[in-house]
């Protein structure tokens, strides 16, 4: 497991409504299909965001993540199915003042200064944050008078983040917010996202990094080819991706190993077996009982990225 995932394990943001299950989602897609010409970007996809949650929409490139975000922002309409934000159609102007977004392909005028961009965006909202606070939170102090076009890639990303939060919205969409960032900038942005969550904001974040979803989200929705393929807490997602792999030298046959309860995959090569199971301990106990010559034992957790590949393959 990468260090980042371990370091943040204890700080995982929780939904801010632990005592009751909220009835009304803040935002939802119900059986939404969205086509672009002959391409089906979303295929009967349903999802719901509850107050105070940080949900990660996780999937490979082309899975439909940005399409889902654009539908919830009312930038595009579903081909069929329903999008709802605060109980209304997201294309209605009233919902927009409660929503902030950081989009992948944001059209930002290059010749305008950072502070002017923030002032302009803030003017769309009834209760925007003070400029100084936005600059501080997005770490733009000292570069507020530079033109957007003169900034580095990471600085531009931070401006986009500032534009997402400057209106003090209740619901924030972050579409691949850390793409192209180095590890330090990514960690810093993770920390900012956590602090928004601690203020009770509802956040939908898209990413193709399982590590990022694991570090930030209270719930992960894995999508591929426009459909939900898995949904749960980060721990559940990692478990459902196959569990751990037992590797050892054994005389046990492939057929025997495959028949053990809880085994999801078996490979044997040159007398070395690789046995994958979400219940590695009980499988291992059974193997040791059945083969007293078993040797060279290793038990490994899948790398997060391998777990993700296992989930999204086919
Ligand atoms: P992701 O954000 O997960 O990478 P997208 O939602 O951007 O996925 O895209 C989903 C699918 O829809 C892809 O096959 C993509 O090529 C297609 N697509 C997205 N936007 C358009 C568009 N404007 N015109 C045509 N096809 C599109
Ligand atoms: Mg995208």
Image: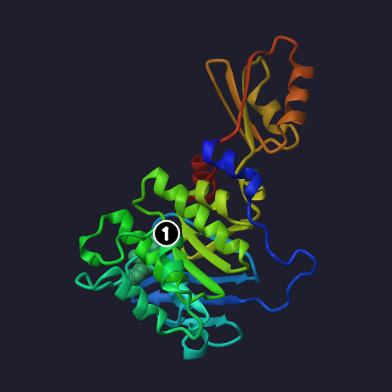
Judge whether 125 appears above or below 269 on screen.
below
Q: Which residue is drawn at 65% across and 15% down?
A: 250
Q: How far across and how far down the image is residue 64, in percent?
A: 44, 65
Q: Is mark 1 within 8 Å of ligand 2?
A: no
Q: Residue at x 36, y 50 (%)?
A: 181
Q: How far across and how far down the image is residue 156, in percent?
A: 31, 61
Q: Which residue is drawn at 48% across and 61% down?
A: 206
Q: Can residue 102 be seen in this view?
A: no
Judge whether 305 appears above or below 100 on screen.
above
- Foreground pick, 123 / 279: 123
Q: How far across and how far down the image is residue 285, in percent?
A: 77, 24
The N terminus, quarter of image: top right
Label 1 element class: loop
- Within 10 Å of disc 1 (Cα), the crowding (few <14, some 14-19, many 20+) is many
Q: How far across and how far down the image is residue 84, in percent?
A: 56, 82
Which residue position holds label 1? 177
Q: Can residue 71 be seen in this view?
A: yes
- Foreground pick, 112 / 105: 112
Quadrant in which residue 55 is drawn: bottom right
Q: In which quarter of the image is ligand 2?
A: bottom left
Judge whether 255 appears above or below 250 on screen.
below
In this rendering, position of residue 185 left or right of residue 30:
left
In this rendering, position of residue 75 left or right of residue 1:
left
């Amino acid at each position: 497991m990468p260090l980042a995932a371990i370091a943040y394990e204890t700080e995982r943001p929780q939904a801010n409504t632990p005592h009751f299950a909220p009835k009304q989602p803040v935002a939802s897609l119900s059986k939404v299909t969205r086509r672009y010409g002959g391409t089906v970007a979303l295929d009967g996809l349903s999802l719901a965001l509850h107050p105070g949650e940080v949900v990660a929409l996780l999937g490979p490139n082309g899975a439909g993540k940005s399409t889902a975000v654009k539908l919830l922002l009312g930038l595009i309409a579903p081909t069929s199915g329903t999008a709802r934000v605060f109980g209304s159609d997201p294309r209605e102007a009233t919902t927009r003042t409660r929503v902030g977004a950081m989009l992948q392909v944001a059209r930002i005028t290059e010749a305008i200064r950072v502070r002017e961009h923030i002032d302009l965006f803030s003017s769309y909202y009834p209760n925007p944050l003070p400029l100084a606070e936005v600059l501080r939170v997005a770490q733009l102090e000292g570069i507020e008078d530079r033109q957007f076009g003169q900034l580095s890639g990471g600085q531009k990303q931070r401006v986009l983040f500032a534009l997402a939060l400057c209106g003090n919205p209740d619901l924030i969409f972050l579409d691949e917010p850390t793409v192209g960032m180095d590890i330090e900038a990514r960690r810093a942005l993770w920390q900012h996202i956590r602090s928004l969550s601690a203020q009770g904001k509802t956040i939908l974040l898209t990413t193709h990094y399982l590590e990022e979803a694991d570090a930030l989200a209270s719930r992960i929705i894995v999508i591929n080819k426009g459909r939900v393929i898995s949904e749960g807490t980060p721990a559940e997602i990692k478990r459902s991706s196959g569990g751990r792999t037992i590797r050892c030298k054994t005389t046990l046959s492939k057929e025997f190993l495959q028949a053990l309860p809880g085994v999801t995959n078996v490979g044997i090569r040159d007398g070395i077996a690789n046995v994958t199971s979400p219940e590695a301990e009980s499988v291992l106990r059974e193997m040791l009982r059945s083969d007293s010559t078993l040797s060279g034992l290793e038990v490994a957790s899948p790398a997060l990225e391998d777990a993700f590949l296992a989930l999204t393959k086919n």
